[in-house]
Amino acid sequence: MLYSEKWFVFCLIWSIGATVEEQSRREIDYILRDIESMFPHQNTVFEHYVNTEKKDWSPWEEKLQANWKPVEKEFHKINVPTVDTVRNRFIVQTLLDANSQVLLVGHSGVGKTVLIDGILMTLDSLIHYFSICFSAGTTSDITQEIIETNFERRAKNKYRPKNAKIKAICFIDDLNMPKKDTFGSHPPLELIRQWIDYGFWYDRAKILPNQIQELQILSAMGKPGGGRSEISKRLMSKFHIVNYTIPTEAQMKKIFETIAAFKFQIFDEEIKNLSEPLALATINLFNIIQENFLPTPAKSHYIFNMRDISKVFQGLYQADKNFYEGKEQIMKLWAHEVLRVFNDRLNSFEDRDQFKLYLNEQLQLQFQLDYKEHCMTNGDDAIFIDFLNENMRVYEECTQFDKLREYLIEKLETYNTQPKLIKMDLVLFKDAITHVAKIYRVLNLKRGHCFLVGVGGSGRHSLTRLSAFISEMNIF
């Protein structure tokens, strides 16, 4: 196969083949190997690129840095490179350089936005970029206004990027979120489609064409469903679509094992060795949950993605070397974080009991521990907080429940003495106390967001106010 032919085949793979799911990629692999047998036998054709130095096929894995370690210490800034991230970054960057309109499609939590943000941050200083996050309430008026504010008029009705930039890239996240109008179309998307086709849209006051020059659209969207609708094929045909596949289990294991190993590198040897089994146990548990706890009309919030696995490890990152000296302490923390991320979402006692059976299976399989024996305190699930230690804030297990109750009663009394705050007359029974601890935990996580589900009068507002007060945060 000639060098130019290899590049042709590579372009064929990442034009026609870029749109398909993992299973269909294997079928395309079979078809291409039937036509041309010169591909390396290892993995699929999607796992190789044209090496310009060797003028031959090389695996994408070669581009991964050996023994990579995070530079950032803040959890939410860690982005472990994998074959998928390296490959998709190269494809998207190349398409942007070629002035193509790009659309990344994939399930929630696979890293589309993180990839795009990383690319935008490394753009040439002569390129201006800005972001729009679409929602169900986004209108064409708002979309047009946001884009036009990033441009300036240079001639009659001709707009170019601000500050004499050579090009502007508009990143549109959640492209398929706007709701359909009466006629079944998406006005914001039709506005974008009109600009791609004709290079202008109309000034809404003067009814004159505004020509938007040197603009490029880079967008991302999730699969249809859960509020996301299908976009028109007419619009889709204007984009170069790249399907972001779900990482394989091997890639997921590598990601979270790397994250855990980075955290535990300063801990004792016994804890260092937990990185791999912790990653395996969390991924296994995640797969079991996805298969067994499916969303229904009564359980519409039973939706899980890779972000949930990240949240477990984000909780582990709160462990302090000086307070966690043995394997059992880390395992108790891990079990607590798994309960907070997965178990707290389940809305029936039957589901929660079943989940704990699955959790116990993983504890026995990976760590030879029993949940009741090693992860419970006085017959109850462990509670981890960081506000009881008077000397320093350290995330540790609360072993004195009465002390926690006294602390919360004291904070509630202080809250009720504050001017301009609505007084609350609360009875802090056991469940209320544990809910305050759970809400407080989420509020104090970086990028922590909490969605409280419950019947009216169950205390969602009042317990959130108390948790925010303890966290020294304002509520609005």
Image: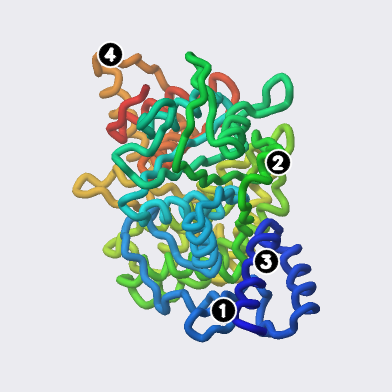
Tag 3: amino acid: Leu
Label located before the other in sequence (4 or 2): 2
Q: Where residue 96 sits: x, y (%)? A: 49, 54
Residue nearest the viewer, comparing 463 with 99? 99
Residue ID for mark 4: 420
Which of the two discs, 1 and 2, sits closer to the camera? 1
Label located before the other in sequence (3 or 2): 3
Q: Where residue 445 sits: x, y (%)? A: 38, 45
Residue ID for mark 1: 59
The residue under the point 72% across, 51% down is 292
Which of the two discs, 4 and 2, sits closer to the camera? 2
Tag 1: amino acid: Pro
CB of mark 3 within 8 Å of CB of mark 1? no
Which of the two discs, 1 and 4, sits closer to the camera? 1
Q: CA distance from mark 3 to mark 1?
A: 17 Å
Q: Where residue 160 sits: x, y (%)? A: 39, 37
Label located before the other in sequence (1 or 4): 1
Residue ID for mark 2: 295
- Label for residue 12? 3
Label located before the other in sequence (3 or 1): 3
